[in-house]
Each structure stands twice: as structure tokens, then as C-alpha cells.
């Protein structure tokens, strides 16, 4: 079990709770739904906290960030309808390889997905749209924000890779690992240390904030919540900034 998951208490990751929803900051390295390879998952923890809990959407196991859980069936259906109507706004932050000046770039390449991987496919792919903007350029990397309008498997990762901006530490989609030795001049590794590890050991992607209309609240009652970076993502951004 990964250190981010060991001893995890569901109460400690709650960002907001009302009569209808629990919004959490999902740590990396834990599956949203049941995973045969792991003893625990977010759904299991949520049901232990609230018996009728249902996860409203999914984040990949490595992806951290904001995740919405319904406390009853009607709230779950309400959120599902919002998703279908594209009335849930999710914004992700990612560290990508290379320096890029994206200004609301429209990534509209169609995506074809299998069970575990996706690709841009102009013949068989389904319509997809991600809006991408640069937040902060560094020395050899860029912090970007991504707004996926549609919700295809690995959509952000595929679209960024198509635009030569693969997410750091994402070799499946062409993203190089990020090492301190690449960032820091005259970097000397101690002879006694093991082989250098990447600054972050997972796909550098974080679900940063979400906004949606609350159950029973009408159009005026909007739930909007931001999930702070977990330690590994925060360290990555600070190191990139320090040596930029």
C-alpha cells in the first residue's frame, strides 16, 4: 500500500459536505472504484462513512484532486444529468514537457478508446473537446490548466500529447520523467544514494477545481470547490519554479 493511502481517513480528505454531496480531495495512488489489486478504494471508504454513498465520476488511480460523491440516489441522478448536459465544470492542472504559450487552445481531435488506452483517431474517434491555457512557464516545462468539455478516457493526456505537450511522468502518452538533475545546475548525486528518482513518480495531473448546480438549489445555488495540490505535485511545482 502506498504511503499516500496507508492509514488514510476519509474524514481527513473531505473538502465540503452538505445534505446531498461529499466533495473530497482524492489522494494519488488510490482507485476511485473497486480494484482487485488493492484492499481499499474511494467508494469503499465513502460507504463506510455514509452507507448510501455513490461516486459521481471517476479519477484515474494516479490522478489526485477534487471528486464528488452523492449521499443519496436522487443526488446521484441529478449529477449524472448535469454531466450529460455538460453542466459540470472541471478544471485540471498539469505539468507538461516543453515550454508552451497556450491561450484557451481548443483541442478538438476525436478520441477512440479501448478499455485501458485512448488515441486520436480521425476516422473512428468520438467528438472530444479540451480547452487548454498556460498558467506558468518554467525552464523546460509548463504548468497548464485544462477544461475537458467532453469526458473521454484519458482525454486530457491524449489531447496534450497530440499538441506536443505530453504530461510529465506519463510514458504511456509520451511524457518524460522529470528529474532534479535536469533542473539544477551542477547537480551532484551522492555516491551512496540509489539511482535518482523522478521529482514526481506519477502522471503530473491534478483535478484542481469543480463547479456544479447543487441538488434542490436551482441555478442560483452553485457548489464550487478547489482541491489543494497534494505534497508530490506541490513539491514538483516549487522545484520547477525554483530552478526556472
Image (spheres, rainbow, N blue to C red):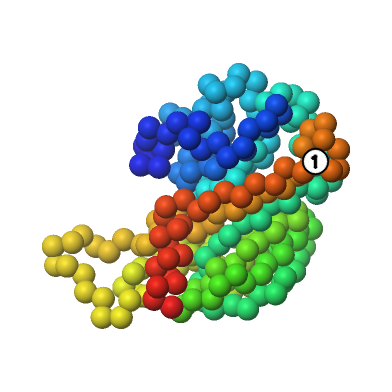
Q: Position of residue 43 (x, y in %)?
A: 57, 30
User: Is residue 228 in sight in this rendering?
Assistant: yes
Residue identified by numbered label 1: 221
- Residue drawn 80% across the image and 48% down it: 87
- Residue drawn 35% across the image and 42% down it: 3
User: Is residue 119 in sight in this rendering?
Assistant: no
Task: Name the residue nearer the viewer: 169 or 113.
Answer: 169
Give the vertical position of 181 relative to 36 (above or below): below
As drawn, the residue found furthest toward the top would be 51
Left or right for 201, reference 33? left
Give the vertical position of 25 relative to 185 (above or below): above
- Residue drawn 36% across the image and 68% down it: 179
Left or right for 3, reference 203? left
- Residue drawn 40% across the image and 73% down it: 242
Q: Position of residue 182 (x, y in %)?
A: 35, 75
Kind of element beneath mark 1: loop
Q: Residues within 10 Å of mark 1 (few under 14, many from 20)?
A: few
Image quadrant in which the N terminus is located: top left
Amino acid at each position: 500500500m502506498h504511503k499516500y493511502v496507508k492509514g488514510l481517513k476519509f474524514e481527513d480528505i473531505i473538502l465540503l459536505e452538505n445534505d446531498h454531496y461529499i466533495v473530497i480531495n482524492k489522494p494519488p495512488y488510490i482507485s476511485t472504484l473497486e480494484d482487485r489489486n488493492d484492499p481499499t478504494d474511494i467508494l469503499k471508504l465513502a460507504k463506510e462513512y455514509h452507507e448510501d454513498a455513490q461516486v459521481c465520476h471517476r479519477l484515474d488511480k494516479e490522478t489526485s484532486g477534487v471528486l464528488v460523491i452523492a449521499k443519496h440516489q436522487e443526488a446521484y441522478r441529478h449529477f449524472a444529468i448535469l454531466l450529460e448536459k455538460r453542466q459540470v465544470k472541471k478544471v485540471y492542472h498539469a505539468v507538461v514537457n516543453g515550454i508552451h504559450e497556450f491561450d484557451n487552445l481548443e483541442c478538438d481531435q476525436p478520441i477512440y478508446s479501448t478499455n485501458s488506452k485512448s488515441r486520436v483517431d480521425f476516422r473512428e474517434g468520438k467528438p472530444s473537446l479540451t480547452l487548454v491555457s498556460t498558467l506558468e512557464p518554467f525552464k523546460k516545462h509548463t504548468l497548464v490548466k485544462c477544461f475537458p468539455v467532453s469526458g473521454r478516457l484519458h482525454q486530457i493526456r491524449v489531447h496534450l500529447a497530440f499538441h506536443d505537450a505530453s504530461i510529465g511522468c506519463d510514458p504511456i502518452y509520451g511524457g518524460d520523467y522529470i528529474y532534479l538533475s535536469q533542473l539544477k545546475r551542477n547537480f551532484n548525486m551522492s555516491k551512496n544514494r540509489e539511482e535518482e528518482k523522478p521529482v514526481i513518480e506519477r502522471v503530473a495531473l491534478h483535478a484542481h477545481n469543480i463547479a456544479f448546480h447543487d441538488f434542490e438549489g436551482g441555478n442560483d445555488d452553485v457548489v464550487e470547490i478547489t482541491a489543494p495540490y497534494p505534497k508530490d505535485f506541490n513539491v514538483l511545482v516549487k522545484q520547477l519554479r525554483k530552478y526556472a
